[in-house]
Amino acid sequence: MEKRIALYQKIKREKLIAVIRTDSKEDARKIIDAAVEGGINIIEITMTIPGAMDLIKEVKNHYKDTVCVGAGTVLSSEAAQNVIDAGSEFVVTPHFDEEIIKLCHLCQVFVIPGTIVLKDMVQALKLGCTLIKLFPANLLGVNAIRSFKGPLPDVEIIPTGGVNLETIKDWLDGGAIGVGIGNDLSKKALQTNDFSYVTKYAQQLVNKILDWEREKE
């Protein structure tokens, strides 16, 4: 329980998860290293990456406790068990799955179920989830979180899908606890094979969050 609480607090504090999705393990590792260099310390390695579980182990062994490494696009309880065995510190799903949630809680691993459906959010809260991934967030827009918080004032939401440098402050203003950044973080680097773009973009994201926090003081 303490590990789950600590991870929740880290996400709430840093407000930024890099969602890594590439066609190769090698590109994924380059993006991760560049994102960490740019100041992002929470990494979600999606299971669509070839060799994703080996990558989880590699990144954890390299960065130790300085970077929090989790698994995304986890679609079944079997896959959840596999990524937990590989050392994943958190599990993210694109959907609501009661079996995955129960397994993660049993293993004392933080789980973030994804949904855009109020009923799923209610069920996730009943099962003890403290954070919901709004996915795909761009389908609903930045005002969606306030709408969900009407009937569910205690729900904590992290939007993923379509969030970028231009909209990150809007999402935070709208009530997001943090954001997941995927395609916009990596697309230019993958197109040009220049991964310094990832570092620069990560730095800009971190600075946007710091600016937002200063504005709220």
Image (cartoon, rainbow, N blue to C red):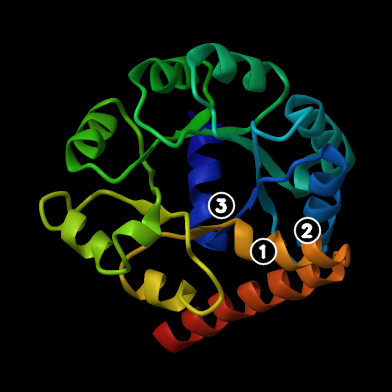
Circle 2 residues within 10 Å: few <14, some 14–19, many ≥20: many
Against 138, is 154 above or below? above
Q: Secondary structure at mark 2?
A: helix
Considering only order in the chain, which callout, 2 or 3, is on the residue closer to the N terminus? 3
**Residue designated by label 2:** 36
Cα separation, mark 3 vs mark 2, equals: 15 Å
Q: Secondary structure at mark 1?
A: helix
Q: Relative to residue 66, is residue 30 drawn left or right?
A: right
Question: Looking at the picture, how far across and down is residue 120, in whole percent?
Answer: 24, 34
Single out the mark in the foreground, 3 or 2. Answer: 2
Circle 3 residues within 10 Å: few <14, some 14–19, many ≥20: some
- Figure quadrant of residue 145: bottom left
Frontmost residue, 60 versus 54: 54
Regarding residue 156, the answer to whether it shows in the image is yes
Cα separation, mark 3 vs mark 1, equals: 20 Å
Q: Secondary structure at mark 3?
A: helix
Single out the mark in the foreground, 3 or 1. Answer: 1
Single out the mark in the foreground, 2 or 1. Answer: 1
Question: Looking at the picture, how far across and down is residue 172, in whole percent?
Answer: 40, 70
Q: Which mark is residue 10?
A: 3
- Amino acid type, callout 3: Lys
Question: Looking at the picture, how far across and down is residue 192, in whole percent?
Answer: 84, 67
- Figure quadrant of residue 210: bottom right
Question: Looking at the picture, how far across and down is residue 103, in whole percent?
Answer: 46, 15
- Amino acid type, callout 1: Leu
Instruction: Check contact, mark 2 vs mark 1: CB within 8 A.
Output: no
Q: Quadrant of the C terminus?
A: bottom left
**Residue designated by label 1:** 185
Residue name at image x 57 percent, y 61 percent = 14
